[in-house]
Amino acid sequence: MDEVRRLVALLVVALIGATAFGLSSASSGLGVNGARVSGNTFRSELAAITATPALQCYLTALDPVSFSTGGGNDTMAASGAAAWANLRIEGISITQYAKSHLKYHPTAATLAAAETSLESELTQAAAAKQYSCPGTSAAALAAMPTEMRNAEIASQASSLYLVSKLDTTIPLTAKSMETYYASHTSSYDDLCVSIAVVPLSKVNAFAVAQAGGESVAALATQFSIDPSKTAGGVAGCFAPSSTSYISVRSDVSTTALNTFPTTPQYISDNGATDALFVAPTKRTPTPYAQAQSAVLADLQNQNASSANTVEETILYRAAIEVDPAFGRWGLNTTGPSVFAPSLPAKVDVNRVKSLTTSATSYQ
């Protein structure tokens, strides 16, 4: 995944799109607005990924598909090839846009900074997925063929520059973060919560008791099947530095103190679905120093959301070409994207290529 593209951890999200989804080209390799990656170059990149476990690991952290060797033992599974094609198209599109519309030409210094940023993003992506990649992100970049590495660094530089030009972007500086915190202090309270996990068969009875004025503790004790019921549903307190904080905050964002919401969430465990009610029982203001990590995460998400709109606009307007051997251009739930070849199914890239060649020879 992530600035303006998925490969910039602070800001980026997935970039997908083209002028008209479904557009593809029988020409070799990939193309974006006339900028090309030849078929041979693209295959050499796939080979480098399959031959480098560290590179596979970090790329999988960005896009959780298999970048490992395919069925032929000398290439990549079709799903991985399509995923890498997607990432390459995203990067080229951003680079082309920054160059043609913003007249951006990175200097040696900005490219060096972009390389450091890209390494940091890969490292953070792997840490977020709890991957123990065999080697550093710097080593993974060094293992890339020269053209591939230069292209990724250039697109990172363009992404960073483009994001800096967005009016809705909040700079991730100490001053801007503290200013944001001061305006949203209540969003970073320490939160103590209680829960009730209620079987679906008892949700109506829970609602009746809740409407009758029973307390959070009484409701949890009477209806919950969670072990916390013995303590009246007490689940603990969460500071902004907690890895669970953002999800807990979301769970209770519109709920008054010492009340369960009337509409539950639903969770599944061992094949059974139960209703989950979460109630905030105490809020305590948190100093900025302790809330900094949550503030940073919030700003990253906001910037990424702003970047999404711009990214999709850029990519919808781009002219995309994809060699059918590497995937097809189509529309998924979030927009146009490269899909693995559908026919023949579940084969690697070399197999697709050999079948295409064989079919041609019989004509």
Image (cartoon, helix red, strand yellow):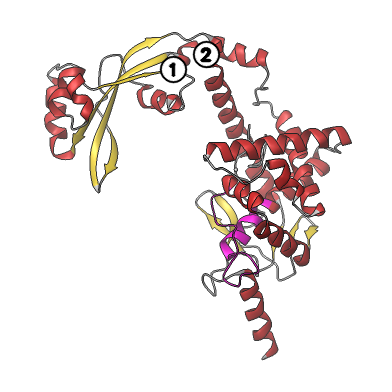
Identify which amino acid the numbered label 2 is placed on. Answer: Gln
Q: Nearest the camera: 229 or 152?
A: 229
Left or right position of 131 against 26? left
Query: Which quadrant is the N terminus positioned in?
Result: top right
Span colored in magenta:
63-87
Left or right for 285, reference 21: left
Q: State whether the magenta stretch is mostly helix, strand or loop.
A: loop
Circles 2, 1 touching at the beta carbon (< 8 Å): yes
Q: Residue at position x 28%, y 43% from top?
A: 268
Q: Is residue 189 above or below residue 138?
A: above
Left or right, residue 165 beside residue 290: right
Classify residue 321 by image quadrant: bottom right
> x%, y% of residue 278?
29, 25
SS category of the residue bearing label 1 = loop
290 vs 214, nearest the viewer: 290
Residue 198 image offset from top left, x and y in percent: 19, 33
Name the residue that disc number 1 marks. 239
Left or right of 57? Residue 92 is right
Q: Is residue 308 visible to us here? A: yes
Name the amino acid, label 1: Ala
- What percent of the width, then of the height, locates residue 235? 29, 22
Rendered position, 62 above or below 70 = above
Mark 2 residue element:
helix
Numbered marks: total:
2
Is residue 107 visible in the rendered image? The answer is: no
Residue at image position (66%, 22%) is 172
Q: Determine which residue is flagged by label 2.
A: 290
Q: Residue at x 74, y 69 (%)?
A: 27
Q: Residue furthest bottom?
A: 362
